[in-house]
Amino acid sequence: MKVDIRVPVGLPIQETADFIAGCEAAGFSGVGVHDHQHSGRDVFLTLALAAERTSRLTLYPATSNPVTRHPMVLASLAHSLEEVAPGRARLTVGPGYLSVGNIGRPRATVAAMREAILTIRRLLRGERLEFNGVESRLRNISDPPTPVFMTAAGPRMVELAGEVADGALLLVGLHPKAIDAARRRLEIGAARSGRNLDGFQTIFITPTTVSDDGPAARRFPQQWFRPDQPYLKYPSDSNLVWLREAGIDLADDFVPEGISDALADEICDAFGLFGTPAECLARLKRARDESGIDHVFIFPTHTQEGGYDMPRAEVHAFRETIIPGLGALA
């Protein structure tokens, strides 16, 4: 099983690049860094510096969007990262959340995402395209092109990933029924464009709270991401769709404090990794056995205020316990 991890630009860029190098030493397969322009630190500069400090990690933004960055700019940045880290770059694109909200713009629609992904992939293949009546292309490209993944949470976005992207980062939880439902959505999208999913890579975004106090780690469903948004609705209400696929039917207007400890435990088991390092290792093994999951993206849980805290506890737990435990079964 490959294990990637989300790292924020929570330190000066050079220090974040050093932290990412530590993730490689810990045994992670890849690192995704948020594309939050309001942080005052640029994700692609950070990834380029990290590329100079690493030799094996796959590096990517987690996640860029076509609202704050034009598709041609994203294509150029993807190829630039590919030049710095040949064979280790990936572009991930989603509708946007905090980054677009911080400039007062709505998230990209399904139609806008379809156009953006197709445009970026064509540009990375060297094709000429027309923008506002002007024909243009990238003067430099890679062979093979940098892969373009979609980050998808809602059912329609999951279908779109199967239709137009090279791969997907899916936020659907780890329950086998939710995984099966998401894979069916990918197939629906692929059928719409007349292609199959041979070679299509799926990475499962896995919310994670690892702690020596397992029961405390499983209290996250009872928390708020910010005052107007329960954590279970971050980044969107789509989380409730996949929990329902898993047999957990929360009302749309649920209140986190109304969730019992027993229900919180059930939600955590369906949604991600919550508990001691040994418990998280066991849950990953079960996800592999139940659903054939072979690649996860560890997304440390946090509030909006804590979104830039470095995932030191998670790196330590994966380095010392979880990655060695997974490797022992290889």
Image: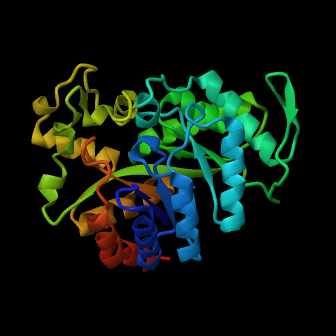
Residue 287 figure quarter: bottom left
**Does 277 appear above or below 176?**
below
Is 166 left, or right, of 297 in this rendering? Answer: right
User: What colour scheme was applied to this rendering of the protein?
Assistant: rainbow
Seen from the viewer's position, the closer of residues 283 and 254 is: 254
- Measuring from the top left, give residue 233's x and y in whole percent: 31, 31
- Measuring from the top left, give residue 15's x and y in whole percent: 40, 68
Seen from the viewer's position, the closer of residues 87 and 138 is: 138
Residue 109 figure quarter: top right
Is 312 left, or right, of 137 in this rendering? Answer: left
- Measuring from the top left, give residue 72's x and y in whole percent: 72, 39
Is 142 left, or right, of 230 in this rendering? Answer: right
**Does 56 appear above or below 174?**
below
- Measuring from the top left, give residue 264's x and y in whole percent: 18, 41
Q: How many marks?
A: 0
Residue at position x 35%, y 56% in the image: 10
Residue 80 figure quarter: bottom right
Residue at position x 71%, y 45% in the image: 75
**Does 181 appear above or below 49?**
above
Residue 147 seen in the figure: no
Residue 207 seen in the figure: yes
Residue at position x 28%, y 20% in the image: 252
